[in-house]
Amino acid sequence: MLSPGRETDREATAVLADYYCAFSTLDVQAVLPYFHEPALLVSPHAVFAAPTGAELATALAPVIESLRAREFGRSELNLRDVQVLSATTTLVRGVALRYKLDGRELERSGVTYILQKAETAWKIAVLILHDPE
C-alpha cells in the first residue's frame, strides 16, 4: 500500500494526465471539469481569475482557437517535480510539450499546477505558465 503522500502524488498526476488527453481534443467543454471553481490562471502576459467554468471557457477559447490554427495535434506533460503540500493540496511542476498534427514539436512551456482535492476529485486551482527552464 502506498503511503498517503505517495497515493496523493499518484492521484494528482493521474488527473493531470487525463487533463492533457482532454486538452488535446481542443474541446473547451472537455477541459472545464478538470478546473476548480474558482480557478486562477497566471501567464507572463496576464493574471486571470475565473470564478466559474463559464468565465474560464471564455479565457480558454482564444488559446484553443490559436492552437487549432497552428495545426496543434496533441500535448503531453513532462513532470519535473511533485510536492504534496497537504492531504488536499499538491503542487506539480513540469514542461507542457505541444506537438503539431504531423508530430513535430510546436512549442514548450513551463507549467506549475496547484491541485486542490474537491469533494470527489482533484481539480486544478492554479495554473501558472512560465519559461520551461
Image: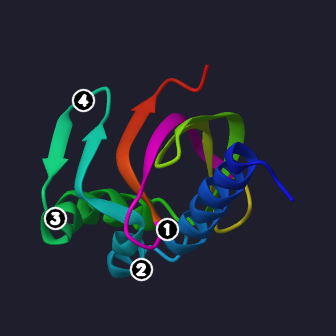
Secondary element type, mark 4: loop
Between discs 1 and 3, the one toward the N terminus: 1
The residue sitting at 37% across, 74% down in the picture is: 33
Between discs 4 and 3, the one toward the N terminus: 4
Between discs 2 and 3, the one toward the N terminus: 2
In the shown orientation, is residue 69 left or right of residue 50?
right
Q: Which residue is mark 3?
A: 58
Mark sitting on residue 23: 1
Q: Residue 26 location in percent, x, y?
A: 44, 73
Image marks 4 and 2: residues in contact by CB distance under 8 Å = no
The residue sitting at 15% across, 46% down in the picture is: 49
Amino acid carrying mark 2 in the image: Ala
Mark sitting on residue 45: 4
Front residue of this view, candidates 118 and 18: 118
Image marks 1 and 3: residues in contact by CB distance under 8 Å = no
In whole angstroms, how far apart are the C-alphas of marks 1 and 3?
Answer: 15 Å
Image marks 1 and 2: residues in contact by CB distance under 8 Å = yes
Amino acid carrying mark 3 in the image: Thr
In whole angstroms, how far apart are the C-alphas of marks 2 and 3?
Answer: 14 Å
In whole angstroms, how far apart are the C-alphas of marks 1 and 4?
Answer: 21 Å
Q: Which residues are magenta?
A: 105-121
Q: Residue 6 location in percent, x, y?
A: 75, 47
Secondary element type, mark 2: helix
Q: Residue 47 location in percent, x, y?
A: 19, 35
